[in-house]
Amino acid sequence: MSGQFFDKMEQVTGVRLNDVQKQAVTHTDGPLLLLASPGSGKTTTLNMKIGYLLLEKQVPADRIMAVTFSKAAARDMSERFDRFFSTVTNEKVHFSTIHSFAFQVVRESLNASRVPYQLIEGSISDEELKKGWDGPNVPLHKKFILKKLYWETSGKQISEEEMDELMTYISLVKNRMVQHKDLDSIECSVNQAATIYKAYERFKKSHDPLLLDFDDMLTYCHKILDEDAGMLAKYQQQFEYLLTDESQDNSLVQHEIVELIAGPAANICVVADDDQSIFAWRGSDVTKLLQFEKSYPGAAVLTMSQNYRSTPEIVGASNQFIKRNEKRYEKEMFTDNDSGEAIQIKSTRTYDEQLQHVLHAIQNSGDEDIAVLYRNNTSAVPLADKLEKSGIDFYMKDIDPKFFKHWVVEDILNFMRLSYNDKRTDILERIHTKCNAYISKAQIAFLKKQQSEKSVFDRLLDSDIPSYQEKALPRVKKTIRDMNDMAPDRAIRTIREKLGYDAAIKKMAEKFGFQLDQLFSTLSILENIAEGLGTLKDFAYRLKELENIIQTSKYNKGTSRLTLSTFHSAKGLEYDRVFMIDLVNGVIPSDDDMERFRKKDTDQMEEAVRLFYVGMTRARTHLELLTYQYKANERLTESIFVTNVRRILKPAEAAAAGGLTQDDIELGLEVIHRKFGPGLITEYGGDSMGIQFEEAGYKELLVDVCIDNGLLQKA
């Protein structure tokens, strides 16, 4: 019978399934884990499986539950189902996200209990925005509630960065099902995050009506199904078959909800790729996936390894690269596609040369779909600047305007504003601790009490000041006024070097736990945008213009052949040509990834590997990896992942390059490190070694990282 089904489907849809896909389709009873490599046709297979249940097994559509991670993926599956089966059946399976299913359960339970509720996440009405801050009048929206609680806890206004951190923390706590006693185990740079979280939960639960955010849908749903046997039995009986897509993105609470619904019958098909689990920062839990056979003893596990998307060159290198990771299912991705060009690795001297290279490649390409992928959204800003100046339209997949609101950007603009008018106390107040003038809060308070048309610096000089300010104030006054006649890029360098801004934010990073490399990256991007502009006003105008260009790029979807996207947002998509940019250590992997790895915590590094792998496997025919040596005056090293790909592509050349082997390492050996230069091995034992470098001082390094990535050579 199944043979006739597949023959008919091939006639109707034009789709011919391979043997593993057919096995997945016909395995309907009992648990199945379907591991789907990139480009292996998982969405097609999942739809065919649903069609098989409807047409061959005669299962009513409302007895099938099909869930996926995002609304976009649910929409894609639904559209694909209609294309395949609209001519052969009127039955229509509902594709939903786990969130929407969870909300259905919560609504039913709360309505039955006559408990009124209100959602506090998503869009907010103008009426709510007009409400005051006192007492019960705080706008009933998640961000406003958290702003108020942060103020009550710390006595300060919360910044956008801190709000993002706090929101991420709250989401992680809920998705990982963390108990209140363990809240401090979840890292958060926001002071007293656990205290604010507890106050937030009390506020929501004590309010009438009950307040719910998006993550509450999951935690309340789990609690209802876990404690209400009648409700659980109802849903277990309603859904005879359960199919979940993109399951590597599910959090612990989402996995638990799915397991509860599957129940004893466990007619569940979980489609996933553990190698593409890249959302740990928002709660996804690949561990649960790796323990599938423990959760479902006797489960079948099938692997769809044939890639229909990419050339053998891209598939082979990607397949080898992901084997860096240890916590994964073993699989061998392959393809029968025609051979294509080799993967390109381009190393430029400077960051700007990297952007110019990408720009020229885009200008000289044909009609192919092109994607430029990067780890952090800030990478898109200077590229968007150059593309727009060259008249090239682009679509940005995930627009993040926070760069233009970042406090570092505001600081630089405030320095420039002060150069136009140094009478303004309000501007000086925002930057007085960052300009080498030793201006105190008391002095700012003194200036605010005065009404004067004199320069703020002259007014301070006329007052009783410490001796160490007598030279500093005139120097800072002159430097800021001189900036008014400078080109914008030179003005930014003056702020960073002469006015001591770099040193000031280093101290802030140490004090508040900011990522210093990200702050310096923001400054470098501002310098890049400023190049070639005539005046400080031109620079301020260009920033506004660029923000608008990026915001409106969303209207180019479907019309532009060029997409700019983070690695995260590109998952599930594919393009003819892919350029992966900013591939330097400190970005991917990040400094934190490498530091944790050095301390034997491998989870973040393995996720960074998976993220790089996702980027590689988006490409159909052309993949280019781009790295550089200098960003502004900072010396950088190419990503250890790029080095790894080099060794995969040309192992003989890598071996001939003189990289150190395990057998070479001994105490007293003189070596040269790619970043730190000449040094002497002074300690060696286990998996680490200590090297005294001539310029960089003493460093403790992991032996495997140095060897695998060719970082050390004999002197």
Image: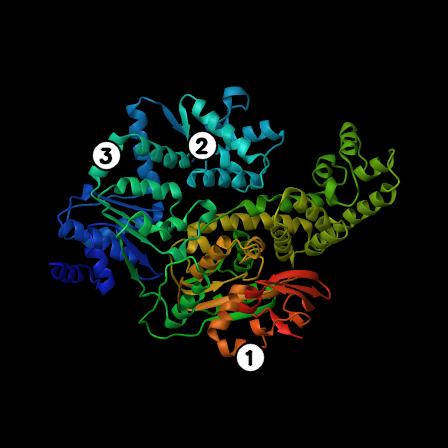
Give the alpha-carbon distance from disc 3 to disc 2, as whole Å: 36 Å
Q: Amino acid at mark 2?
A: Ile
Which mark is on residue 233? 3
Q: Which residue: 60% across, 36% down?
A: 191
Q: Give the residue furthest to the front.
A: 685
Q: Does residue 409 appear in the picture of this structure?
A: yes
Please name whichever residue, 302 or 305, is drawn nearer the observer in this view of the structure: 302
Name the quarter where the C terminus is drawn: bottom right
Image location (x, y in percent) of residue 274:
38, 55
Q: Is residue 445 above or below residue 427?
A: above
Image location (x, y in percent) of residue 623:
45, 67
Q: Does residue 395 appear in the picture of this structure?
A: no
Name the quarter where the N terminus is drawn: bottom left
Earlier in the chain: of badge 3 and badge 2, it is 2
Image location (x, y in percent) of residue 390:
53, 61
Q: Secondary structure at mark 3?
A: helix
Image location (x, y in percent) of residue 226:
32, 34
Disc nearest the viewer among 3 and 2 = 3
Q: Residues within 10 Å of mark 2 (few under 14, many from 20)?
A: few
Q: Residues within 10 Å of mark 3 (few under 14, many from 20)?
A: some
- Is 323 on the left-hand or right-hand side of 237? right
Q: Which residue is mark 1?
A: 656
Q: Amino acid at mark 3?
A: Ala
Q: Which residue: 78% across, 45% down?
A: 436
Q: Secondary structure at mark 1?
A: helix
Please name whichever residue, 455 or 305, is drawn nearer the observer in this view of the structure: 305
Q: Which residue is mark 2?
A: 124
Q: Which residue: 40% across, 72% down?
A: 313
State if disc 1 and disc 2 touch (CB < 8 Å): no
Disc nearest the viewer among 2 and 1 = 1
- Is 570 on the left-hand or right-hand side of 185? left
